[in-house]
Image (cartoon, grey):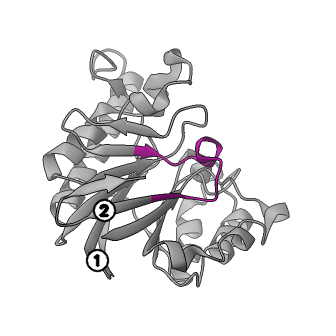
Amino acid sequence: MIRIAAVGDVHLDEDMRGQYRAQLGNLSDDADVLLLAGDLTKHGTVAEGRVVAEEFRDLGVPVVAVLGNHDYQSDAQDKMAELMRAEGISVLEGDGVTVDCPGGRLGIAGTKGFGGGFAGKCATEFGEPELKDFVRHGREIAERFGEALHGLDSDTKVGLMHYSPVKETLVGEPPEIFMLLGSYLLAEALDDAGASLGVHGHAHAGVECGLTPGGVRVRNVALPVLRRTYGLYHLDTAADSSAA
């Protein structure tokens, strides 16, 4: 069994330095790895990125992260990722990493993801150049995510995203903005690669549990949804099952 802790949308700033870390004292007793599902800062500044790096370094387990839309707000996402990597945190975007856990080798592919919507109610690459650019960006991100999932050499695979791959975990958000909260293309990537679990954030008013059309468990780990320091998910590498 592999034990995964995951959380997103912690939205740290300089005034919160040390506060979240104080809640992580038992992490290494609970989990083999910590996944961070984006929106780690409020406004994506370098100073906030430094707080994130300090909060999540040296926790006794590997930490793997993706960035979210808030982390891009100040155009400092590359510097933020650099600060985090300097503290031993893996930051993914269209690539993957394999972690050796007591229960087996865990492969994690990560992407911020993007919007676009869900089957039957999604945008298409038609019309104005701006709309086509929006849809194309989401498609290209999902394609790289799928390639990263397929490239993992591991006992089980997990997809780490900020945007949602399914609309079920968005329930509670206004349906009018679902197109801005996720894309079915991310779910297709999870299904096609045979992932065991997908985790995301972004939807503060959503719900925790969902399922892709192919049966992959999806968990919305946005902190306002979890209302706990992190969610815990167990993957049985033999039975390929997960439970909260």
Image quadrant where residue 218 sits: top left
Seen in the picture, residue 217 relative to 228 is either above or below; the reply is above
The mark found on residue 130 in the picture is none
Question: Residue 182 at x, y = what percent?
Answer: 41, 34
Q: Is residue 230 left or right of residue 51?
A: left
Could you tell me which secondary element the residue under label 1 belongs to? loop
Question: Residue 230 at x, y = what percent?
Answer: 57, 58
Question: Residue 92 at x, y = what percent?
Answer: 40, 64
For the point 39% across and 23% down, the residue is 131
Q: Amino acid at mark 1?
A: Gly
The mark found on residue 103 in the picture is 1
Question: Residue 205 at x, y = what percent?
Answer: 60, 31
- In the picture of the structure, the residue carrying the numbered disc 2 is 235
117 or 99: nearer the viewer: 99
Image quadrant where residue 149 sits: bottom left
Q: Is residue 229 magenta?
A: yes
For the point 57% across and 51% down, the residue is 72
Could you tell me which secondary element the residue under label 2 belongs to? strand
Mark earlier in primary sequence (1, 2): 1
Q: Is residue 29 magenta?
A: no
Seen in the picture, residue 103 relative to 189 is either above or below; the reply is below
Q: Is residue 72 visible?
A: yes
Seen in the picture, residue 205 relative to 189 is either above or below; the reply is above
Q: Are marks 1 and 2 in contact (CB under 8 Å)?
A: yes
For the point 47% across and 72% down, the residue is 31
- The CA span between labels 1 and 2 is 9 Å
Region of the chain picked out in magenta, as a range: 219-232
